[in-house]
Image (spheres, rainbow, N blue to C red):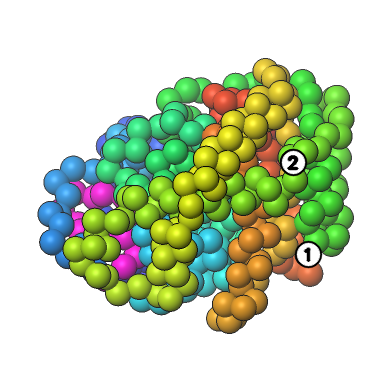
Amino acid sequence: MDDPVGAFVVGPRARVEGRAGGPLAGLTFAAKDLFDVAGVPTGGGNPDWPTGRPVPTRHAWAVQTLLDGGATLIGKTVTDEVSLGILGENAFDGTPVNSAAPDRVPGGSSSGSAAAVAAGLCDTALGTDTGGSVRVPASFCGLYGIRPTHGRLDLTGMLPQAPTSDTTGWFARDAATFARVSAVLLGEAIPVALPGRLVVAVDTFGFADANVAAALQPMVKKLAALIGASREEIMAPQGLSVWARAQRTLQPCEALATFRSWLDERNPRMAYSVARGLVLAAAIPEGERGWANLMRQEARGRMAHLLPPGTILCLPTTPFPAPLRGQPLAILDPLRDRITCLCAQGGLAGHPQVNLPGATVDGLPVGLSIIGPRGSDATLVAMAQAMAG
C-alpha cells in the first residue's frame, strides 16, 4: 500500500473486506494500532508491547462494527506509545505527516489515523480519545472528529489507558462521510432537528491565542445563526488550569495502574517523555488524587448545568495550531499543558464533543468544538452537517 505520509504501521498487512451491501459500502477505513484486528498483532506504538501477547483472534468491537456496516479495513495506523501522547511524535514508528501543515505535528495519540484521512488514503479512521487524542489531531489536521459520550460505545478489543476517560472516536474529511460513519457506530439515525440554545464558553476563547479566537469567530456566528439563541458563559469557574490539573492527576494515575504489570515484567523500551510521565504518576500522593476526584465531580456538575437538553456549547478545540515537528521538550511541555486546559472537560465530565474544521491561522487549521449533553452525540453530528451546508 502506498503510504507517502507514514501513517500506517510496518508489519503484517491488515486488510479486511467489509460486508457487501452495508450502509458504508464503498468506504475504506483504518484503525489505530490500539484496536485488535484478528490475525494481526496489536502493536500499541511500542516495540515491546506485543512481546509475549497472543495475536488477537477477534476484531475489536469498533472494527467489527465498521466491517459489518460495509466499510473495508485497509490497515493499522501509527499511535503515540500506548496512547501516552498528544502531539503525534513516536520515537520508534516516526511522526506521520500532517498533510495540512507538513512541517507541523499531526497531533496524537491518534496521529496515524488523522494523517491517513487528511492525506486521502482512507475515508475514515478509528482513533481513541482519553485526554484529547481525537480532538487535537482533528483540529491540527483540519478534520471532523468525535469523542463520544464516555461509556456509550463498547471498548472491547481496544487497548485501555485510563478507563474512566477512555473513548473510541473517528475522523472524516467531509461532513457527509462523518455522518454516515457516525450513524453506524452510534447505532442511531442522525436527526434533522438542531439544538435550540448555544453557550459560548468565553473563558476558553480568552485562553486561546488571540489569532485563533479571531479566526473562529465566523464559525461561532454561523453556529449562533443556525441555532437562533446564544449566550456567553464561563465553562470552568474554578479555572481551566484547575480542571487540567485534575485531569493530569487522574489520567496518569490510571495509566500507571493499567501498565504497571507490563512495566514490572518487561522493563520495556520507552521514549524519555513517556517514561517520565509514568514515573511522575507514581509520585502523585493519595491526597492529590482525592482532590482531583472531587474536582471531577464539580466539573460534571458544571457541565450538566450548562448543557440541559437542547443546548450545545462551543469552544476552541486547541489553543493554537499544530506546533512545529521535532522541537525540544522544554518547548513542547508548556504546549501540552495548554492543550490539556481546553481538553480536560472530556475526561472529567464525559460529554460528547465534535471538532468542526473550517478555520485557519496563517494557513494552518484550527478547529471549533461543540459539546452537548451526555447522549447527544448524534445531535452534534447533525450540527456538523448543518455547519457544512
Image side of residue 47 versus residue 77, left or right? left
Residue 322's place in the image compared with 237, above or below, is below
Asked if one can make out residue 131 in the rendered structure from this viewpoint, the answer is no
Please say if the residues under marks 2 and 1 sit with CB atoms less than 8 Å apart: no
Residue 331's place in the image compared with 128, above or below, is below
Q: Which residue is mark 1?
A: 361
Q: Position of residue 128 (x, y in %)?
A: 44, 48
Q: Please identify the dominant SS of the magenta region.
A: loop
Identified at 19% across, 57% down, the residue is: 40
Q: Position of residue 17 (x, y in %)?
A: 26, 46
Work out how far the residue at label 2 is from the one at label 1, CA to CA, in angstroms: 29 Å
344 or 157, which is in the foreground? Answer: 344
Q: Position of residue 338 (x, y in %)?
A: 68, 60
Provide the residue span drawn in magenta.
32-47
Image quadrant assignment for residue 220: top right
Identified at 44% across, 31% down, the residue is: 151
Image quadrant assignment for residue 12: bottom left
In the rendered structure, which disc, 2 or 1, sits on the residue that comes first in sequence? 2
Image side of residue 256 versus residue 351, left or right? left
Q: Which residue is mark 2?
A: 238
- Residue 209 inside the magenta-drawn segment: no
| Mark 1: amino acid | Val
Image side of residue 3 versus residue 291, left or right? left
